[in-house]
Amino acid sequence: MRKLMVIAVLLAGCGTWRGGAAETAAACVPPGSWAEPLAGAAGPSIPGPDLFRRAAKAPIVLLGEQHDSAEHHRWQFQTLAGLHAHRPDLALGMEMFPRRVQPALDRWVAGDLTEEQLLAETDWRTVWGYDSALYMPLLHFARMNRIPVVALNIDRALTARVGREGWSQIPPDAREGVGDPAKADPAYTDSLAEIYAAHGREGKPGDVKDDPAFLRFQEAQLLWDRAMAEALADTHRRTGATVVGIVGAGHMERRYGIPHQLADIGIPDGMVLLPWSAGSPCFALEAGLADAVFGVAADAEERPSWRPRLGVSLAPLDQGLRVESVGGDSVAEAAGLERGDVILAAAGTRTNEVGKLIDIVNRQAPGTWLPLSVQRDGATREVVAKFPGS
């Protein structure tokens, strides 16, 4: 199963599977072509014009991505442009932005902000952290064509709080206007249990479903899906436009996440489109994965190269970054970091922003030591993350 982005941001250590030379010899979905996914294979090729004509009639079109894949973002740009040629009346919804920054997006589309101003006013490094250059072509296309850009997300602090306390404990005035999510499909629960168990939790997927911590984790994921579904639906109903959603693939695969919540809202006919990278295993293709997949090349960035990996997933707090899980055989595990620790500072720099810690980690050379100030059980201690040589 392809990895779903969870509440925390994964810091270089719980990486996505990459296909090797054997897997890249023959692509399951030929690059440059659309196809319907079947069990372990791609179906017959779908002509691009036929697919775009169909998509232009849909209320919502979801374009999935692996967040750090340049090829996926190029495919999203191409698909957005193709859809715009068939239906200029579009809106662009983006997972990358919380609702509170909508005024900045409006000013961007109106031409009133520079790139630097947009990134500053949307707190890009804090709330998202991935390379903004991957997303700027989409944002420039929207501005050039005066396509509204809509913030789909909610603040991570809310999803983190639900993960700690549960949805029922969140007061109505703290829910950012989001309604109660629809109950998860049992198969989605299975998928989330697999993800939960894979990120440092004890037990097999089948053993965690009654764990209160897992139930809160699932509620946080459903909240995330519901918030984005409501924003997409509201935009379509207000404007009448086809809304193109730029969202992580895990929120739409098999129609479990956002599509499931959209159906509960009354919009069951949105389309799900996914890129399929050369080298991705054919067995991962399955009927119902998406309405269509498009073959893209493997990312050049996926070639093996050394980079510093801490190996934790994190949730932001006011005073620091809470460690949600620690990867096995990671730098973080060797340093003695534990789930529940709060990283207060790295190399003397306060780390209550995920993007800031990513920057610090990325600057580490092979063989260097990074001092971390960590709070555990009310006491502050110093630990040292020792990065291996290249």
Image: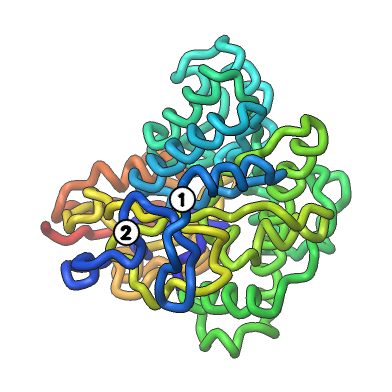
Secondary structure beneath label 1: loop
Q: Which residue is mark 2?
A: 30
Task: Note whether 69 is above or below 88 in the view shown.
Answer: below
- Tell me residue 170's x, y (percent): 81, 56
Location of residue 355 by image quarter: top left
Residue located beneath label 1 in the image: 47
Q: Is residue 293 left or right of residue 181?
A: left
Q: Secondary structure at mark 2?
A: loop
Q: Mark 2 or mark 1: which comes first in sequence? A: 2
Spot the residue most to the top.
112
Choose between 64 and 227: the one closer to the eye.
64
- The residues bearing labels 2 and 1 have C-alpha atoms spaced at a distance of 13 Å
Residue at horizontal 28%, vertical 52%?
297
Foreground residue among 288 and 250: 288
Percent position (x, y) of residue 220?
68, 61
Q: Is residue 261 left or right of residue 373?
A: right
* Residue visible at 59% across and 68% down in the picture: 254
* Amino acid type, mark 1: Pro
The image position of residue 340, as x and y in percent, is 54, 66
Q: Is residue 323 shown left or right of residue 360?
A: right
Residue found at the far left of this picture: 390
Crowd band around label 2 with a 10 angstrom C-alpha radius: few (<14), some (14–19), many (20+): some
Question: Please, is residue 293 above or below residue 87 in the view?
Answer: below
Residue 270: x and y, percent? Answer: 68, 52
Q: 328 and 335: which one is in front? A: 328
